[in-house]
Image: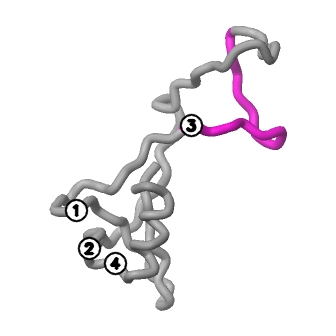
Amino acid sequence: MFFVLDTAFGRFWNICGPDSTSLLRKECEVEIMSEDYATLRAELDGTRTGTINVDTVNHAQSALLTIKREECSDRCKEKLDGMLV
């Protein structure tokens, strides 16, 4: 996943990693809830976990503006730290 900052002025900013122009990213595991769906080749029988290749889904739209992580507000940095980013 990547992170987008929603400011009080109604502007969205991509957040970059420290000393970087690349989007700040975090790899994570997701749980598919009942309102979502996936098409799999094998039955989900509850005895093992599976992997879904998320490269096959459309990418989320990022913001048009970009800010470095160190330029974010203290509150924003605290939230990112809380997510171990």
Residue at mark 4 to residue at mark 1: CA–CA distance? 11 Å
Highlighted magenta segment, given as a residue range: 29-41
Tell me if mark 3 has few (under 14), some (14-19) or many (20+) residues whose alpha carbon lies within 10 angstroms of its own: few
Residue 7 in the image, given as x and y percentages of width and height: 47, 83
Dot 3 or dot 4, earlier in sequence: 3
Which color mode does the image show?
A: one colour
Relative height, residue 38 to residue 70 (above, below): above
Q: Residue furthest left?
A: 19
Q: Which residue is mark 1?
A: 18
Tell me if mark 4 has few (under 14), some (14-19) or many (20+) residues whose alpha carbon lies within 10 angstroms of its own: some
The type of residue carrying mark 2 is Glu
Q: Nearer the viewer, residue 34 or 63?
A: 34
71 vs 45, left or right, is left
Tell me if mark 2 has few (under 14), some (14-19) or many (20+) residues whose alpha carbon lies within 10 angstroms of its own: some
Q: Which mark is residue 72?
A: 4
Does the magenta segment cover residue 34? yes
> Secondary structure beneath disc 1?
loop
Dot 4 or dot 1, earlier in sequence: 1
